[in-house]
Amino acid sequence: MGVLPWSPLKSGCLSGRYRRGQADPADTRRSAVLGRPGEAQFTVIEALAAVAAEVGASPAAVALSWVQHRPGVSSTLIGPRTLGHLESNLAGLDVELTAEQTATLNEVSAPVLNLPYDLNQQVGRMLKYAGATVDGVAGPVYPPLLQSTARY
């Protein structure tokens, strides 16, 4: 099953037009409808701008390239309003990101998941796999299991 991301530029947030400490662009509708980007969004915007400067492309092109190369993405739904937007978006087809650049964007854009996700990440492998190697990763054994000689 393929994924078709909607609004990959976060309603213009990742277009390169928003900067921390600067006024919103005058010709945008985003601020009136969705409000100004928050601190977490500016962290992503700044990382995206840094990667864009490294590869010599617009933030929009880098964002679209990153989205298009995510696992499971079969296509990306774009919504340019002008010819300039379209050209900037299509430039993303030619952007190639390094593993380090991709890792940076993955890290800053990772969603914060609620309990029990974090608990499952810490304890889940110990309980589910109890020392078995799964997908090439050896799982630790839950410490109380190691203290008992009983095996089930």
Image (spheres, rainbow, N blue to C red):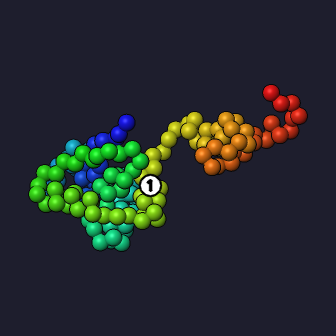
Q: Is residue 150 above or below residue 67?
A: above
Give the x, y percent position of residue 144. 81, 37
Query: In the image, what residue occupies the spot 86% across and 30% down?
Result: 150
Name the residue nearer the viewer: 30 or 89.
89
The N terminus lies in quadrant: top left
Disc 1 marks a residue whose amino acid type is Asn
Q: Position of residue 42 (x, y in %)?
A: 36, 58
Residue placed at 50% from the left, 41% from the top?
113
**In the picture shown, does residue 148 fall above or below 35?**
above
Circle 1 sits on which residue? Answer: 106
Name the residue: 28% across, 52% down: 9
Name the residue nearer the viewer: 50 or 141.
141
Q: Position of residue 87 (x, y in %)?
A: 16, 60
Residue 134 seen anywhere in this rendered image of the structure? yes
Snapshot quadrant of residue 140 = top right
Residue 120 is situated, as x and y percent measured from the top left of the image, at 61, 38
Quadrant showing the C terminus: top right
Q: Secondary structure at mark 1?
A: helix
**Is residue 49 something one can see in this rendering?**
no
